Amino acid sequence: MDIDSFKQDLLAAGATGVSLVNAGNIEIREEFRALCQSNECGMYGTNWSCPPACESLKRAREKMSCYSRALVIQQVSPLEDSFDFEGMMKAQREFTGLMVKAVNLAKTNYNLADFLALGAGACTICAKCTYPDEPCRHPDLMMPSMEAYGIDALSLAKLANLPCGNKSDGQPSVYYMGVIFF
Ligand code: SF4
């Protein structure tokens, strides 16, 4: 795969940072997965992409260990202020859209048949997730949450040499990240 070309396509699609890392260097920790259960994000048990619906951390580790490289994709979006919850939700939906584009690009433009894409937090493809009453509407597009796979955004940003925080150039901002293992 032409990684540089894929990176350029992702930047053109709205990513603010893209970085290739060694998949084996991504830190996976039980404590990060355990944070899901503490439900600080309010999404625990509400979405097919999150615990307890998604796979166990043991299975997640097995899946990630099948790949040698990973492309970390970041989108930084400005907020009105640090309490701009609506802005955060809008930015997350936009980031999910970017990750869906990334997956489609990987399949169609780069003939990537075997890969694993993880999104930022709960899946926001549908306005309301069908969990737990009906099967997922888009199992081919749905991405498990990176956090549910035991990956901490801050550690991943450091590894990928991408920025992380709550401000960008002095402007309150939200940083979303996803990853494609291949
Ligand atoms: S695609 Fe829709 S139904 Fe499936 S996990 Fe995402 S929000 Fe839920």
Image (cartoon, rainbow, N blue to C red):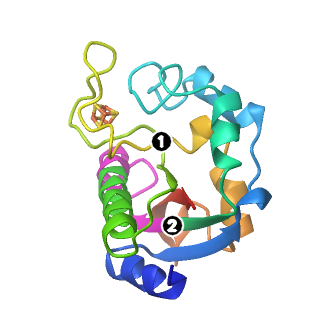
Determine the secondary structure under disc 2. strand
Res. 22 visible in picture: yes
Measuring 79% from the left and 60% from the top, which residue is drawn there? 25
Measuring 28% from the left and 28% from the top, which residue is drawn there? 129
Kindly check if marks 2 and 1 are in contact, taking CB atoms under 8 A apart as contact: no
Q: Which segment did they paint magenta?
A: 74-91
Q: Is residue 156 above or below residue 123?
A: below
User: Dot 2, crowdedness within 10 Å: few (<14), some or many (≥20)?
Assistant: many
* Pointer 2 or 1: first along the chain: 2
Question: Cβ of disc 2 within 8 Å of ligand 1?
Answer: no
Instruction: Kindly identify the amino acid type of the residue bearing the numbered disc 2.
Output: Ile
Left or right side of 124 for 113: right
View quadrant of ligand 1: top left
Q: Which residue is tagged 2?
A: 73
Q: Nearer the viewer, residue 158 or 134?
A: 134
Q: Nearer the viewer, residue 53 or 45?
A: 53
Q: Nearer the viewer, residue 179 or 162?
A: 179
Mark seen at residue 121: 1
Task: Pinpoint residue 45: horizontal percent, then vertical percent.
Answer: 45, 18
Mark seen at residue 139: none
